[in-house]
Amino acid sequence: MIELRDVSRIYRRGADPVHALDHVTLHLEPARFSALMGPSGSGKSTLLNLIAGLDRPSSGSVEVAGTCLNELSDDELAAFRARHIGFVFQFFNLIPVLDARRNVELPLLLTHLRRKEREERARTALRLVGIADRAEHLPAALSGGEQQRVAIARAIISDPEIVVADEPTGDLDAKSASEVLELLHELTERFGKTVVMVTHDPRSERFVDETFHLDKGVLVKPATANTTAEASR
């Protein structure tokens, strides 16, 4: 599903090069929940952005869902993201004047679906994440955990193969964080989604199938299957 081969990403800070990623090779199987962990500045978000088609490598190749992203134009990358990638962020990014259903419906406004079908799909997505009864509530009336569930519903409404999550529990209490992590795991178990998450939270390791550790742009620990995940939950 996701294959990075000898990938480096170098930025410029003035005249000085910054090696955000340094010759990273990584293979992620489909329908798995993977975590990218490491200290701030380790390259986690850069790696996630490359997988999501939001950034390009300085060298090496990035293949996602059978497509080599290096070869795509900016417009083709945008179309690829719309078809294949769902995004979940730390701060939810919900529109405060829209209720939960309309927030979830937003990605479908770029399609040719009729209004009734968009509404039905949004309600289905909210039901899948367990908050169908909150469809008409504004974000301010929802808890942090509920807002993140709305964000996850929005991420999956277009039925993407891959969901990328950048610190999805960073703004949540422990109980809500566990519920969101369980939900992300369920996306792989029940619906076959490939989920890739950046996180600082060590509690997340018991929910994921494998963990990748980065430090200073280098993959410092190979992925390990989390065979005790079910027993820990």
Image (tube, grey):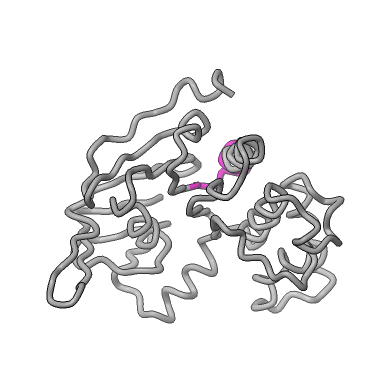
Name which quarter of the figure residue 91 lies in.
Answer: bottom right
Q: Is residue 187 magenta?
A: yes
Apparent side of residue 49 relative to residue 153 in the rendered image (left or right): left
Q: Main secondary structure of the magenta part?
A: helix
Q: Where is residue 116 in the image (x, y as percent from the top left)?
A: 85, 71
Kindly identify the residue that appears in the image at 65 percent across and 70 percent down: 107
Kindly identify the residue that appears in the image at 49 percent across and 68 percent down: 81
Give the vertical position of 111 relative to 137 (above or below).
Answer: below
Give the vertical position of 56 relative to 177 (above or below).
Answer: below
Q: Is residue 209 magenta?
A: no
**Residue 162 visible, this orientation:** no
Q: Position of residue 44 (x, y in %)?
A: 35, 52
Q: Position of residue 61 (x, y in %)?
A: 24, 61
Q: Locate the C terminus and report the quarter of the image it occupies.
A: top right
Give the vertical position of 87 relative to 221 (above or below).
Answer: below
Name which quarter of the figure residue 57 lies in.
Answer: bottom left
Q: What stretch is highlighted in magenta?
A: 186-195
The count of marks equals 0
Apparent side of residue 80 relative to residue 191 in the rendered image (left or right): left
Kindly identify the residue that appears in the image at 63 percent across and 56 percent down: 156
Apparent side of residue 139 relative to residue 71 in the rendered image (left or right): right
**Residue 53 visible, this orientation:** yes
Kindly identify the residue that appears in the image at 39 percent across and 80 percent down: 74
Name which quarter of the figure residue 45 lies in.
Answer: bottom left
Q: Where is residue 88 in the image (x, y as percent from the top left)?
A: 56, 57
Apparent side of residue 76 relative to residue 89 in the rendered image (left or right): left
Give the residue furthest to the top: 231
